[in-house]
Image: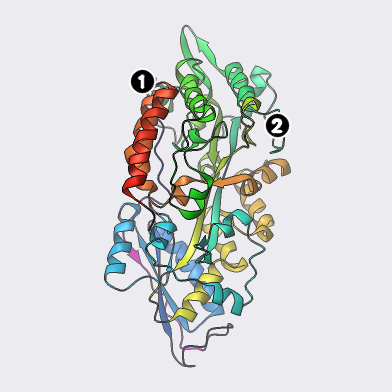
Amino acid sequence: MTAQISRRRLLKSGALATGALAMPRLLANGPHVGSAAAAEVVQLSMLQAGDVNTLHNMQKLMTAFHKRYPNIMVTPNVVPWANYDQRVDLLLAAGTPPAVWFPGANRGYRYYASRNFFPSIDAEIAASHYDLNDFYKALIDFCVWKGHHVGLPADYYGSFLVYNKTMFDKAKVPYPPTDWHDKSWDWDKYLETAKALTVTQNGKTVQWGSMVDDDARFPFWIFGGDAFEEAGYVTGFPQKVMLNSPAVVDGFQFISDMINKYKVQPTPAQSQAAQGAAPSLFTTGKIGMHRTANWVFPTDAKIKSFEWGIAALPWPSKRYGLKRKIPLYPDQWMVMKGQKHPAEAWALQSWMSGPEGMRIWMQAAGALPARKSLADAAKSMLKGWKPNITNAEVACVLDSANFGHITPSHAVVNWPIIGDQVVNPILQKLQLGHLTGKEAVDQMSTKLAAVLKQYPPQ
């Protein structure tokens, strides 16, 4: 059974925490913040999901922000992941929205954008000559809603492969490439490699060449197919179910066959038994390859028992003639409508997405920076986790932003309902071998069509 990750993977626990950083009554020394009188201290709030460590990180950020804007006092509110969406709804209902909000739980920014909670910031961008060209294109483009910029990129989590070098060396199998353009590395080659890495002793599998993906959405794309039409990722409201294609049907069957036919991936029961008390299944040293994202680095950095590497994800098999789609998970800083001090809220939002704020944030959150100019800072962070990381591996990780496709969980407004009620239950049956790829597609298509009809565009 695939581990069901939420829209956000990292910040899931902790108690409600609020920290206000009181600052002297000084005039802000930054541009375009002129709504407050010289002696007035403007108070803003931020909302983030996490725990007490998140609060400490946010306080560090606000200390740096206040050096730039000393007349703006920001209260960072940190709410446990499980209660985050509910807290946002309560604040909106009370007419006290946070000045700056971060999409830290099940709902992406588009859930609130579709309900008109984010005003356009086109005028602020133009007035301050805010340069958008430094952002990775996919990330800044995703901040456009109905033709207007409504947010700014905060960070991203890009997809790639991690693999057990020690296992490859023992099996005398070549390492997978770091070059995203290498089309010889496709899923057929991946399966061949996974078979070579899988070891059975006395009728029992003791190591597997691959493990089940930790994102239940990936099977749509594995062979280049999709669940929805491309326009649905732009509008946030897909209108067509595109599952019934050879690429998706075969992709679903491939996911099942990896476990149930070829046995190069562990079953749910095998995964649980093999992992034991280890922080993840990959860290046990019993897995050859794993499609994942940079949220694994804090865990994988602790691996001491084997050498591990980073590689590009495979291409779809040539027989489908389709482009590769790999999951890209972006975050944003958003200003909610109804602000008493919109100029100061823009100052906070633009600083958080600026080079200084983003540099501090990425180090605190462990996320990759949305700005290309911070590649060196990202490289230093990656080397901190993996001291022997090669330049090719660094490039492979960072280039994931250029090859990624925004996931349905972020792009589709009603994904929490779609994922929980339709996608995850059917894919779990598929992985258990209870459904064929065609049966899974047929069931999912019918249910997806019903959900899309139930939640029309707003």
User: Could you tell me which residue is drawn at 42 percent across and 48 percent down?
Assistant: 7
**Picture layout, residue 160 above or below residue 206:** below
Which segment did they paint magenta? 17-30
Query: Residue beneath label 1, please?
Result: 434
Q: Position of residue 407 (x, y in %)?
A: 50, 46
Label 1: how many Cα within 10 Å (few below 14, some 14–19, many 20+): some
Outermost residue on the top side: it is 202
* Inter-mark Cα distance, 1 to 2: 33 Å
Q: Main secondary structure of the magenta part?
A: loop
Q: Position of residue 40 (x, y in %)?
A: 44, 90
Tell me which numbered mark, 1 or 2, is placed earlier along the sequence.
Answer: 2
Queried whether the magenta region covers residue 23, the answer comes back as yes
Query: Residue beneath label 2, please?
Result: 183
Does the image show residue 258?
Answer: yes
User: Could you tell me which residue is drawn at 48 percent across and 54 percent down?
Assistant: 235
**Picture layout, residue 89 above or below residue 240:** below
Front in this rendered view, residue 312 or 294:
312
Label 2: how many Cα within 10 Å (few below 14, some 14–19, many 20+): some
- SS under mark 1: loop
Left or right relative to 431: residue 406: right
Q: Position of residue 355 (x, y in %)?
A: 62, 66
Which quarter of the rendering shows the N terminus?
A: top left
User: Could you tell me which residue is drawn at 67 percent across and 55 percent down?
Assistant: 375
User: Could you tell me which residue is drawn at 52 percent across and 67 percent down?
Assistant: 148
Decide: marks 1, 2 in contact (CB < 8 A)?
A: no
**Picture layout, residue 212 above or below residue 343:** above
Does the image show residue 302?
Answer: no
Queried whether the magenta region covers residue 98, the answer comes back as no
